[in-house]
Amino acid sequence: MSQLQGEIITADAPSSNLGNYEEAYANFHWEDVEKQFSWYVTGKVNLAYEAIDRHVDAGKGDRPALLFSDSARNETYTFADLQRKSNQFANVLRGQGISKGDRVFVFMPRSPELYVSILGIIKIGAVVGPLFEAFMETAVKDRLEDSGAVALVTTPGLLPRVKRDELPLLKTIFLVGEDIETQEGIVDYNTAMEAASEETEIEWVNREDGLILHYTSGSTGKPKGVYHVHNAMLQHYHTGSVVLDLRENDVYWCTADPGWVTGTSYGIFAPWLHGVTNVVRGGRFSPGDWYETLQRNKVTVWYSAPTAFRMLMGAGEDIVKQYDLSHVRHILSVGEPLNPEVVRWGHKVYGHRIHDTWWMTETGGQLICNYPSMPIKPGSMGKPVPGIEAAIIDDNGKILPPNRMGNLAVRTPWPSMMRLIWNNAPKYEEYFRIPGWYISGDTAYMDEDGYFWFQGRIDDVINSSGERIGPFEVESKLVEHPAVAEAGVIGKPDPTRGEIIKAFISLREGYTPSEELKAEIARFVKEGLSAHAAPREIEFKDKLPKTRSGKIMRRVLKAWELNLPAGDLSTIED
Ligand code: WT7
């Protein structure tokens, strides 16, 4: 570990919003951030107002807020446009009897309507539930059911994945598309929007009222509903300033989809709280398309993920030279370990350092980061955001000295800390089992200079291309296949994707292993759950290692895979 610590890439922008890190850290007060917002005075708040309407009230309504493009559309929306449209959708929702505290989900590809819907839901004080468009039947049903969602915004193409007869609480579906046939419970989004007033009464809520419910995976059980409140905007605003380094005239592009927390906290909230122009590009990843998006929109601040940067690195240097990327000032990354090699390559080819940031769905916002004004040690996640205390602690809560690996923990609370796991208090409490600390589930160490270095996950959660996948959810789907008796799923290290999903499977009587069967089983998961949850590798085994209580020992599977010692086997079945 110490070998890496020696390398330093010096600061590339000493005149950033943050300025000197140590000074900023020492002098920080959350109250100074609170004073940015009207609710410091009134006590009442609505994030959608602060993100959109506030800028219109300040005379900046004509400023471009959303630059949307995909293969079919290329559209610009100002802050005033988004104010009117989100007001309209707020009125549409109210027209269906939807109100404060209700869970309203969005399930569609990136489009202006998706962003307008999210803002409209927040404006009436309802709780947004974003679903990734690749989710299939089971993934959609589990989330809508657990949350008790009353309404959903989706498209005709995705509607067949919504099992309405199994979701009695789901009363209303808004369909975004052409020639919608309305029926009981189905509302044509476009027609309803046209008929709705462009003015609305914003629902003023308390800081601790619900904002968003992001489902994410753990190592056991179904996905967990991570619940965030309006107060989280303090973290979004603060980090938008000191980490994203946003300035008034920036054009900002976060490549994440709102189905994941990066796509909401940093794809919607942080940039718009700062009144900054936000680029959204629909469609799939391709290096040429991404560079073209940076060039065409004159992007200044670019937030993406290690898998994307590794693929861009794979596409080489020549393609970079075909585009004018001269407007780019600041590059950031999140989601999985950022390889030192990628940081070096980016520095050479883009002429900028890639700033790694660490956080989680549960933390609601960035916590440990690299800053434009601070030297980067490639491979390190950086240092705690001002206002955040992070430490490496042992299982008893004792703070460990530098260079000792342990639990990466954060002092509680902070503004964007999750406030609930929906319907699951025991799961929530697990994170806070050591008084005064949030236990992340990651292991790390801190060096003598206070830089944090990611080491791994304590649980079996898989991180493939920056997407967090719970092995239990995949295993549950696998055993629904008629050929599968038992299944154990692990993350296998992969040079591009970080990890890929590998499934160990024992077959039922009467089935013989074959390549066709592997492909069919993988397709079964892809079509039932989602493409990113489908195993890329399957290995058939006569028997899987299990504890005496019948739990599949993924740690043993991982040891098989990596040719490592399996560790303590005292609980194994035989
Ligand atoms: C897990 C959280 C919140 C943004 C997207 C991921 C891993 C996240 C880093 C990083 C190494 C990272 C951790 C974490 N992770 N950022 N910079 N370096 N690992 O959110 O899906 O909730 O996953 O992603 O293991 O616990 P998420």
Image (cartoon, grey):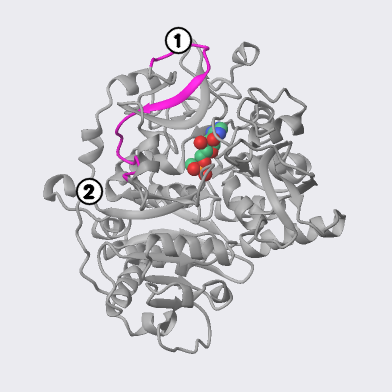
Expressed as whole percent of the image width and height from the top left, the position of residue 162 reads 52, 72
Amino acid marked by disc 1: Pro
x 63%, y 23%: residue: 568
Q: Residue at x 43, y 77 (%)?
A: 174
In-image side of 516 versus 357 (left or right): right
Q: Please tell me which residue lies in front, 64 or 491.
A: 491
Residue position marked by numbered label 2 in the rendering:
207
Residue 265 drawn at (x, y percent): 42, 48
Figure check: 231 above or below 128: above
Q: Could you say where residue 347 lies in the image, as x and y percent from the top left?
A: 64, 30
Q: Is mark 1 within 8 Å of ligand 1?
A: no
Task: Kindly identify the residue that appears in the image at 59 percent across and 42 percent down.
Answer: 305
Closer to us: 437 or 208: 437
Residue flagged by tag 2: what amino acid is it? Arg
Query: Can residue 331 be seen by looking at this rendering?
Result: no
Q: CA distance from mark 2 to mark 1?
A: 37 Å
Give the residue number, with chain letter if any, for mark 1.
401
Q: How would you rate the neighbour count of disc 1 (Cα within 10 Å): few for under 14, some for 14-19, many for 20 or more?
A: some
Q: Quadrant of the N terminus?
A: top right
Image side of residue 560 versus residue 12, left or right? right
Q: Which residues are magenta?
A: 398-419
Q: Quadrant location of the C terminus?
A: top right
Can you say whether 39 is above or below 460 in the image? below
Q: Secondary structure at mark 2?
A: loop
